[in-house]
Image (cartoon, grey):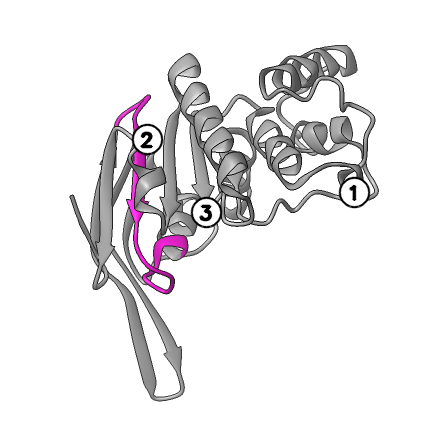
């Protein structure tokens, strides 16, 4: 499903350089739920962005569904990000002028390949929103939702194209403990019911225990 080989990431500032990732290796089978734990600044988000094709490694390979994603053209990589990988971030990144249904549907609407009819898209969005407990919020705007509800919308949006991989970057960082527990339980449910591979990065070791496999990012390398 997903394999990272010898991932290095170096940032340059004039004559200075900062190596954040120092040869990270990671293999994730289909349907596995993996958590990566580490303090702020350890490079967790950088690694997640590299795994998802959002940032380029200085050195190394990322193999997703038997393709070296950094050997693909920009158009090919964009297609994979849109259709095969779902992203959930700490900040919800919902479009304030669009309703819940419109926000959730957006990744399918901008896809040139999926060719989903408006009826099929509405049906799919309704099913997903029901699964995340928001089927009564279809026509609401983000400003009318709580933080936990907004994150549920973000999760539904990540699922609309039926991806094989869900990447979660501190998805509970802006939530209280009750909503955090509910969001993690929802991610676990999605993982189990859909056999969807999940990578969760967090600084919270307690939340990470929900995963099947937990790694710690220390000094630029992953430790199991």
Dot 3 or dot 2: first in sequence order is: 3
Position of 9 compared to 158: left or right? left
Compute the Cα span from label 3 to label 2: 14 Å
Q: Residue at x 76, y 39 (%)?
A: 142
Q: Is residue 6 visible?
A: no
Q: Residue at x 75, y 30 (%)?
A: 100
Q: In the structure shown, which secondary structural element does the residue marked by tag 1 occupy?
A: helix
Q: Quadrant of the N terminus?
A: top left
What numbered label is drawn on residue 57? none
Is 43 in the magenta?
yes
Q: In the structure shown, which secondary structural element does the residue marked by tag 2 occupy?
A: loop
Q: Residues within 10 Å of mark 1 (few under 14, many from 20)?
A: few
Position of 184 compared to 100: left or right? left
Foreground pick, 183 / 176: 176
Find residue 201 and report its image quarter: top left
Residue stretch rendered in magenta on the structure? 29-45
For label 1, the residue is 143
Compute the Cα span from label 3 to label 1: 21 Å
Dot 3 or dot 1: first in sequence order is: 1
Q: Position of residue 182 (x, y in %)?
A: 50, 29
Q: Residues within 10 Å of mark 2 (few under 14, many from 20)?
A: some
What numbered label is drawn on residue 170? 3
Compute the Cα span from label 1 to label 2: 30 Å
Q: Residues within 10 Å of mark 3 (few under 14, many from 20)?
A: some
Q: Residue at x 45, y 46 (%)?
A: 169
For label 2, the residue is 210
Q: Position of residue 135 (x, y in %)?
A: 71, 17
Q: Residue at x 15, y 43 (%)?
A: 224
Dot 1 or dot 2: first in sequence order is: 1
């Amino acid at each position: 499903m997903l394999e990272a080989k010898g991932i290095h990431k170096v940032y340059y500032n004039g004559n200075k350089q900062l190596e954040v990732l120092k040869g990270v290796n990671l293999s994730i089978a289909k349907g596995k739920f993996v958590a990566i734990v580490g303090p702020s600044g350890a490079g967790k988000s950088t690694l997640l962005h590299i795994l998802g094709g959002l940032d380029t490694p200085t050195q190394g390979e990322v193999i997703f569904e038997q393709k070296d994603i950094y050997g693909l053209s920009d158009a090919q990589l964009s297609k994979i990000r849109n259709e095969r990988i779902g992203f959930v971030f700490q900040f919800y990144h919902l479009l304030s002028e669009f309703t819940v249904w419109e926000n959730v549907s957006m990744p399918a609407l901008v896809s040139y390949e999926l060719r989903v009819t408006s009826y099929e898209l509405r049906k799919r969005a309704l099913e997903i929103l029901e699964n995340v407990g928001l089927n009564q919020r279809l026509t609401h705007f983000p400003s009318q939702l709580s933080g936990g509800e907004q994150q549920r919308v973000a999760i539904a949006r990540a699922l609309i194209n039926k991806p094989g991989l869900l990447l979660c970057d501190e998805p509970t960082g802006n939530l209280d403990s009750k909503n955090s527990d509910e969001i993690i339980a929802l991610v676990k449910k999605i993982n189990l019911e859909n056999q969807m591979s999940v990578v969760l990065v967090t600084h919270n070791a307690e939340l990470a225990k929900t995963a099947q496999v937990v790694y710690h990012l220390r000094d630029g390398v992953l430790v199991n």
